[in-house]
Image (cartoon, rainbow, N blue to C red):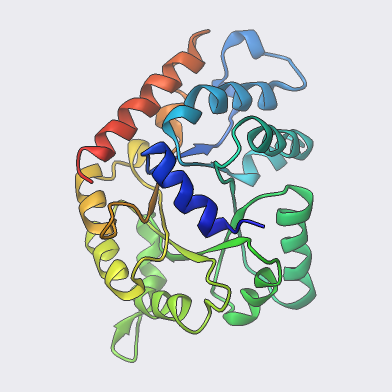
Amino acid sequence: MTSFTQTLGAAWQRTGSLLCVGLDPEPTKFPAALAGRSDAIFEFCRDIVDATAPYACSFKPQIAYFAAHRAEDQLEALIAHIHEKHPGLPVILDAKRGDIGSTAEQYAREAFERFKADAVTVNPYMGFDSIEPWLAHAGKGVIVLCRTSNPGGSDLQFLTTDGKPLYQVVAALAAQKWNASGELGLVVGATFPKEIEVVREIVGDMPLLIPGIGAQGGDVEATVRAGRTANGTGMLINSSRAILYASKGDDYAQAAAMAAQGTRDKINAYR
């Protein structure tokens, strides 16, 4: 069995891309041709995936955008489609789960057994008890929230403990004490490139999922220079809305492909 980190490393090399395409479907933004269709979310996301796959190293569906529309079955179908039609491109389920014991075990089963995701985002606020159940699923990636892209993240992530901001403590725990599986990664927002650099120094070559470019305004050059590893990889730089809704017309898939290609090329210019 190929693990998440092995699959991701191979995808970085094979595709020459650090772009992670986020899948946050909002039916109100879909083209008119999909209006009223019961499978509109799957159809839209499938078309986006097929159009952007040549320019991406991974995909990141956000579970809330599916669950809010009772479209979990469409999420299952979408992840199955990615695995079948675009093998080797890992799927990260953006769920940000954070619970302990048997509840965490059920969340892990949901992500890895029901949806067949290759990795999942988790919230570490409840400590290692909330991380450990995910590690029971061999080869699956667990991407821990560290320095998030939202302004309010500083409310907690910059609280000082033992003389260090909390996000740095989380980074060190994830890289050392918690990473028994070797499959952990961290979420670090592109809106804070200085903190990306600090986290990279703490965690070495651990994968960083970096949201915040595109609609959130993160600087691509600063992000890449701060987060790249020695071989020019190490990052999944996520863009969602700027790619998904590059056009609201019938050319939405082609427009998404052009946006993804342009984003990939901009990222690569600074690698």
Q: Is residue 266 above or below residue 190?
A: above
Front one among 158 and 144 = 144
Residue 222 drawn at (x, y percent):
20, 50
Residue 71 sits in which quadrant? top right
Q: Residue at x 73, y 47 (%)?
A: 115
Residue 126 drawn at (x, y percent):
59, 78
Q: Is residue 39 above or below residue 239?
A: above
Residue 142 drawn at (x, y percent):
57, 64
Q: Is residue 42 above or below residue 31?
A: below
Please give the count of numbered marks on the rendered protein: 0
Q: Residue at x 57, y 19 (%)?
A: 30
Front one among 7 and 69 = 7
Residue 134 sits in which quadrant? bottom right
Q: Is residue 238 visible?
A: no
Determine whether, in the image, residue 190 is placed left or right of residue 14. Answer: left
For the N terminus, give its image quadrant: bottom right
Residue 133 drawn at (x, y percent):
70, 73
Q: Is residue 123 above or below residue 6?
A: below
Q: Residue at x 59, y 31 (%)?
A: 25
Front one among 207 and 193 = 207
Front one among 253 and 30 = 253
Q: Is residue 157 visible?
A: yes
Most extreme residue toward the bottom, as rendered? 162
